[in-house]
Image (spheres, helix red, strand yellow):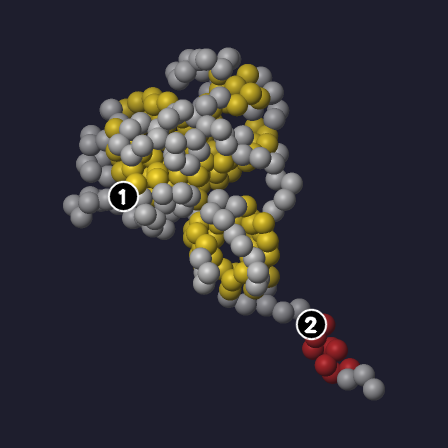
Amino acid sequence: MINTASVTVAAQPGPFAQMRTGVVASFTANEAQISAGGSTFPAAYLEGVNLSAGALVACLYQGGSWLVLGVLAGVGPNLLAAGNPNFEASPPGLFPDLWFQANLSGVAAIAVVDEPGAPVGSQVAAVSGPAVGTQSYLYSQPIQVTSGDQFAVSAYAGGDYQPSDALTADAALVALWFANETNLYPTTSAVDIVIATATDLVQSPPYTTLGGTVTAPVTGFMRIALRSTTEASQRVLWDGVIVREL
């Protein structure tokens, strides 16, 4: 005989559930840290699952906790994979190999540094500038685009402060457009497009995940710029830059 009361209870909807895409910030045998929507949170995962930092994953939220369902497939390769996206190709103390600098206000200092808490690998790009409102681009190798192409872009940004600093460093992901692959900023072919911003970065870790989508307004080449705004002894730390075509 079927227990109709039990069937009725089982069929009732449970607590609100939410599915979203995130990026693995770190993974150990006991805990996964996932970045999504500008925040980082711990998540459970299925037995036998092995995750790597930077992987794009599907997560389920229900009953006050997160569960990693698995790594997403079919999302396309990182178009910056050969462009030193994790800043591991340069020795600490040097400017990041395969990247370029443009000063928008003041003069920024940019170098690769060792960072034990780096989201990906063991190094990050550190951007600083002592003058109030120092702002710069650290921008990437070119990616060929056709007008109308859409891309998903993400990166980790963290604040790094001295005790006397106000926690006011800002970060942004910006798409730059060029007529050919040799032109450098500011010789652009269209207006810069801001993809995502984060103001008043907290002391890292945790790192903030900046992410969003952008549509190419022109046929030519796109470079991804990491925009940092600092003052005093503040630094913005960057890591794990990913560009995927949608």
Farthest bottom residue? 1
Q: Which of marks 1 and 2 is nearer the N terminus?
A: 2
Tell me the quadrant of the picture where the N terminus can be found. bottom right
Confirm whether residue 132 shows in the render.
no
Which quadrant of the view contains residue 30? bottom left
The x, y position of residue 158, in whole percent, is 34, 43
Q: Tell me: residue 20, above or below residue 223.
A: below
The x, y position of residue 205, in whole percent, is 34, 50
Confirm whether residue 131 shows in the render.
yes
Q: How crowded is mark 2: few (under 14 residues within 10 Å), some or many (20 or more)?
A: few
Which residue is pictured at 34% across the width and 21% down the height?
A: 102
Which residue is pictured at 59% across the width and 56% down the height?
A: 69
Residue denoted by label 1: 160
Farthest left residue? 164
Label of residue 12 in the image = 2
User: Is there a contact, CB below 8 Å, between mark 1 and mark 2?
Assistant: no
Q: Tell me: residue 142, above or below residue 32.
A: above
In this view, the mark in front (1 or 2): 1
